[in-house]
């Protein structure tokens, strides 16, 4: 993988050489793929880069961008189009094991960096739709997530376990999350699936514009599904997390994970991880979904091998 250099740092280097002072080194550009702009993945990418650019501008020039989600980010990292990407723990598992979207095509150069926040599989509806259970989606217009997103895979799993065929039993939409949130308010869809950390603006925004409900995703089949997979856990969204949702909601969760490629240098990953965790309080304070994170627990939920640059830092800290 070629090393990109920031234009600003390159110009400084050129200037320094022209003045005869020339030992300055250009900062390495790194690009992090997040998710929809209303989702927490984008905040992971954005806030991580804010820390990097403030604290390590001499070494790294970081850009966090919205992206299409877990599957897209894993593939883009593997192909060298992204240096880092945020992906669900189930996508991390499936890519490394050659399953699901990567059936028979293991992503050999995928590497784990750290995990972030837990993400719940949510089914959001308006109160006026009469949808009280997953089975009630039959005949309804439902957003299952855009192709390339982890939430689409989760939605397909849920529908299958509840005996629903998205092509025959409902009007399935493939909107990105910002579009889906607006479509729910505008009554263009009846419900949407979304896998996200809580609280999320993608749920708060429609909750502030219309009356919403969260639907339990907790059938016996779901619980068995979770028990058989180490990267899932059953969880509960507390009552009052979102406006108008006054009862707790039982569902299951994955973890967001930061991934990279074995082609990214050990030095680059080490500098990124060290700067991020040495300034972790700033990250925790940047979004409500991060406020309860414990750095020592951010090595959980990872499947692909740890990148040597990340491993070096974690061993220095005594976390592994």
Image (spheres, helix red, strand yellow):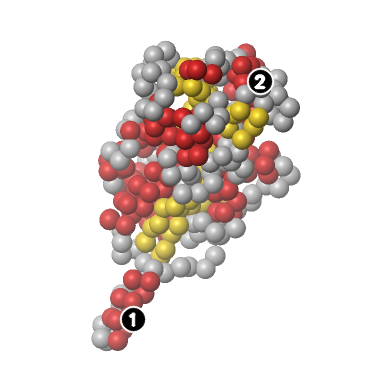
Locate residue 20, reporting x and y percent. 27, 86
Q: Residue at x 68, y 38 (%)?
A: 100
What distance separates the C-alpha of mark 1 from that of mark 2?
Answer: 64 Å
Q: Residue at x 67, y 42 (%)?
A: 101
Locate residue 313, reporting x and y percent. 39, 49
Which part of the image, by quadrant, shows the C terminus? Answer: top left
Q: Residues within 10 Å of mark 1 (few under 14, many from 20)?
A: some
Q: Is residue 308 visible?
A: no
Q: Is residue 120 visible?
A: yes
Circle 2 SS class: loop
What label sits on residue 137 in the rendered view?
none
Q: Nearer the viewer, residue 302 or 63?
A: 63
- The image shows residue 189, relative to residue 279, as above or below, that is above
Circle 1 residue: 14
Q: Earlier in the sequence, mark 1 or mark 2?
A: 1
Tell me where residue 53 sits by quadrant.
Answer: bottom left
Camera-near label (1 vs 2) is 2
């Amino acid at each position: 993988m070629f090393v990109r250099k920031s234009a600003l740092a390159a110009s400084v280097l050129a200037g320094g050489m022209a003045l005869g002072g020339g030992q300055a080194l250009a900062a390495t550009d790194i690009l992090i793929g997040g998710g929809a702009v209303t989702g927490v993945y984008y905040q992971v990418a954005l806030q991580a880069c804010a820390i990097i650019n403030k604290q390590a501008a001499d070494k790294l020039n970081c850009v966090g961008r919205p992206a299409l989600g877990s599957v897209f980010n894993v593939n883009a990292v593997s192909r060298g189009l992204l240096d880092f990407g945020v992906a669900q723990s189930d996508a991390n598992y499936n890519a490394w094991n050659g399953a699901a979207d990567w059936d028979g095509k293991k992503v050999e150069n995928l590497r784990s960096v750290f995990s972030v926040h837990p993400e719940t599989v949510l089914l959001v509806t308006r109160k006026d739709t009469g949808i009280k259970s997953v089975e009630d989606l039959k005949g309804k217009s439902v957003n299952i997530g855009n192709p390339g997103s982890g939430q689409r895979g989760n939605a397909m799993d849920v529908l299958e376990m509840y005996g629903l065929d998205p092509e025959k039993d409902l009007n399935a939409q493939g909107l990105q999350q910002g579009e889906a949130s607006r479509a729910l308010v505008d009554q263009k869809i009846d419900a949407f699936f979304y896998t996200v950390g809580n609280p999320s603006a993608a749920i708060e925004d429609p909750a502030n514009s219309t009356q919403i409900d969260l639907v339990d995703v907790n059938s016996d089949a779901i619980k068995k599904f979770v028990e058989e997979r180490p990267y899932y856990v059953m969880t509960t969204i507390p009552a009052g997390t979102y406006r108008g949702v006054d009862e707790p909601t039982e569902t299951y969760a994955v973890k967001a994970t930061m991934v990279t490629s074995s082609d990214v240098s050990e030095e680059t990953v080490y500098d990124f991880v060290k700067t991020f965790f040495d300034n972790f309080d700033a990250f925790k304070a940047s979004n409500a979904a991060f406020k309860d994170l414990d750095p020592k627990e951010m090595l959980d939920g990872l499947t692909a091998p740890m990148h040597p640059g990340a491993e070096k830092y974690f061993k220095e800290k005594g976390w592994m």
